[in-house]
Image: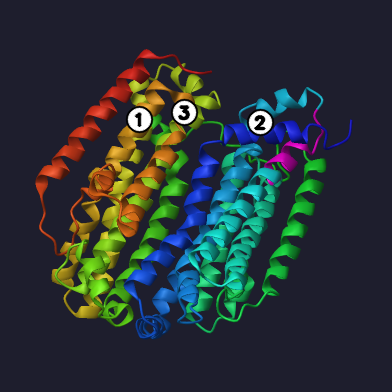
Amino acid sequence: MNALSGTGALLRLYLRRDRLVAPVWIVLLGALPLIYAVSFEGLYPTAADRQAFYLGTLSSPAQAALVGPIFGSDLGALVSWRSGLVLALVPLAAILTVIRHTRGEEDAGRTELIGSTAVGRYAGLTAAIALAGGAVAATGALSTVSLWAFGLPVAGSIAYGASVAVVGIVFVGGAAVAAQVASGARAARGYALGVLAVAFAARAVGDAGSGTLSWFSPIGWSAQVRPFADERWWPMSMSLIVAAMLLTAALAAAERRDLGSGLVAERRGPATAPPSLAGPMALAWRLTRGATVGWTVGIALFGIAIGSSAHDIGGQLGSSAAIGDALEKFGGSTIEQSFIAAVLSIVGVLVAAYSVSALLRLHSEEEAGLAEIVLATGVSRLRWLAGHLVFAVLGPAWLLLFVGVTIGLTYGSATGDIGGELPSAVLGALGQLPAVWVVTAIGMALYGSVPRFATVLWAVLGGFVALGQVGSVVGLPQPWLDLSPFTHVPRLPGATVEFAPIGWLVVIAIVVGIGGFTAFRQRGIRG
């Protein structure tokens, strides 16, 4: 038996387990540039309109930091620029995929069980790399085909798709290394996501300044390919070289470490728990504090970038009738207010992702057998469940409040009216909360009644995004748009608040959540 025996069988197993989640993020991220192409063509139909947008964006360091550098005024160049966040989202999906099928499997005890059969030492890691690598390649290929089919130049379409694929491959390798170094899945995710955050920050700071720092980031290398703007192919060779080095290092490290441990040994904890760990609520905070702090810092930086760029957004977007019609649906009496309302609708979806992650920790704790241990101490199901639900329900409120404050302060400072802009920005952010709670309640219903399908909640959130945010761009009929809870939240600041939809969203969240809790009380715990 060689070290790769059983790789094909494990790859088929991983494909089966990811048959719902992987296609969702491949399609959403792969088709996003096409959606932007449709949007830009409708909003900026003439070369003069696109040139005005390009010049306005070029003079905004905040936009460069948030999205990336812009290299031209052609339709393809604008689409490539606006899709800059995909260069960070694809690596994020790749990291989560690799670690779920490597250290996640080890922590759950399934790797040891499978390893007792005729499976080689490298089979699991190789299958996970192949799955994640194939997924990022499929994302890039879908982007290429969709942009070419839309009518954009072939060379630029290939360059964009390839730039997405190579940055994804780099972080596939990075996640594979983290899985060997860390002592568990949680630490591995922290290492890999920390590297991704540093890479994104280096690209953002570099693009907002002289551009030098961007060359220290794989995300910056892919941005420098410059699709649809005199393509430069050689930066992708840097990504391929680093990816090859990381994958080689991961396979070498897999040979040296013991199953269930990492190259970095796990530190021994204190003999007795401090008072801060007294109870399930404190335990839930200990498990989620890293993610909560990271989300808070990220959402604050996002709010500062949006607030600082909102004051000049009128000059960037231009004054075409299409722009006015597009922003009118987001409410607001000015183009700046409409822009902030549109951004807050996206923030609502991002914060819902935090809530999904916090809620699904219940599922991961139960799958790993840790829930059974906690409940065996005499802690009731209600207290254990409530400890995690507090962060899934109140965590989004904290994040939305924080982003509202940062946007209000920075935008108010730019306009000289903090007293007027701060309350409206905070209310606009908190207005997204009922829709987020509906997503949380659906997750509670899935986890409580059919825990094996709890992770389908990510697909549910993706469906809401496709129906609401994306559907409004491509012109879906209103009944389809109404299926997303994010369609019914108030478009603040500037719009008139209707309390009936908010009330119905809260009622739906309460009823569905109670139903999930009731189902959880009546089912058994998986040990």
**Dot 3 crowding, Cα within 10 Å, few <14, some 14–19, many 20+:** few
- Count all numbered tags in the image, as a single digit: 3
Cα gap from disc 2 to disc 1, whole angstroms: 27 Å
Give the residue drawn at x 79%, y 31%.
6
Cα gap from disc 1 to disc 3, whole angstroms: 11 Å
Give the residue drawn at x 47%, y 48%.
290
**Residue nearest the observer in this picture, 231 or 363:** 231
Residue 308: % across, % down: 32, 75
Residue numbers of the magenta segment: 119-129
Answer with mark 3 or mark 2, whichever residue precedes in sequence: 2
**Dot 1 crowding, Cα within 10 Å, few <14, some 14–19, many 20+:** many
Amino acid at dot 2:
Leu
Give the residue drawn at x 34%, y 57%.
474
Image height of 480 relative to 260, above or below: below
Query: Is residue 207 on the magenta stretch?
Result: no
Secondary structure type for disc 2: helix
Kindly identify which residue carries mark 2.
13
Secondary structure type for disc 3: helix
Residue 510: % across, % down: 22, 31
Kindly identify which residue carries mark 1.
444
Kindly identify which residue carries mark 3.
453
**Residue nearest the observer in this picture, 307 or 451:** 451
Residue 385: % across, % down: 36, 27
Q: Image quadrant of residue 44? A: bottom left
Taking the view exactly as shown, the residue that stands out farthest to the right is 1
Amino acid at dot 3:
Phe
